[in-house]
Amino acid sequence: MLRWIGAVTLAFVVAAAGAWAGEVPVPEDYRQSGYRAPVPDLVPGALTINDNTAHALWWSGAVAFVDVMPDIPKPKGLSEDTVWQGRSRFSVPSAIWLPDTGAGSPDAETLAYFQTGLTQATEGNKASPVVIFCQAECWMSWNAVRRAAKLGYKRVYWYPDGTDGWIAQGWPTKKLKRFQQQ
């Protein structure tokens, strides 16, 4: 009888562990489309953090925050001389906004922009901690985190709840503009 109870308990623990591990599998490469969808619980080469950990890291002032929320593209049909500002974004204070850098296959210019932004955010030290985020259920942040880890950043944190989680907690935000290379 005890063996049967032990076997049932073990089966329950294994099933529960599978549910806790997340239902979205970690892909072998970057997500290429459908960026607003459920995400895995982890990113290879990074540590996943929750709202409270993100806030504690921000409060410490010792961690760079990088927002990769996409920008609104310039509408088709605007004349060449029309100045397009895109949007501003309310985000974590002190974060830099590197829009569109979480695409699955960024062009060379966008990839260079991402690398420049990370270099500036971490003061050129790939061992400096960096938190990368977007919104909840956003593959853009997942891709950007994976890309940063593959670029050799050693202390990459993924904040999957992003600004949705931050704002839900009632924490301060700041209006950001696109990162401008210096």
Image (cartoon, helix red, strand yellow):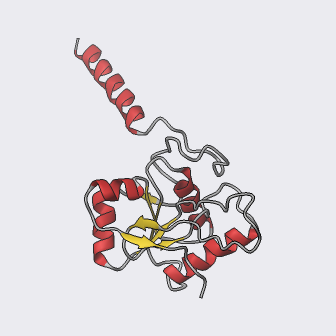
In the image, taking residue 56 as reference, residue 32 lies left or right, namely right
* Above/below status of 135 relative to 40: below
**Which quarter of the figure is the C terminus placed in?**
bottom right
Q: Nearer the viewer, residue 124 or 88?
A: 88
Residue displayed at 56% across by 44% down: 26
In the image, taking residue 27 as reference, residue 38 lies left or right, namely left
**Which quarter of the figure is the N terminus placed in?**
top left
Residue displayed at 55% across by 73% down: 178
Residue 95 seen in the figure? yes
Q: Nearer the viewer, residue 175 or 164?
A: 175
* Above/below status of 85 relative to 41: below
Percent across and percent down for residue 27 are 61, 45
Q: Quadrant of residue 5?
A: top left
In the image, taking residue 175 as reference, residue 177 lies left or right, namely right
* Above/below status of 157 relative to 11: below
In the image, taking residue 132 as reference, residue 102 lies left or right, namely right
Q: Quadrant of residue 65?
A: bottom left
Residue situated furthest left in the rendering: 2
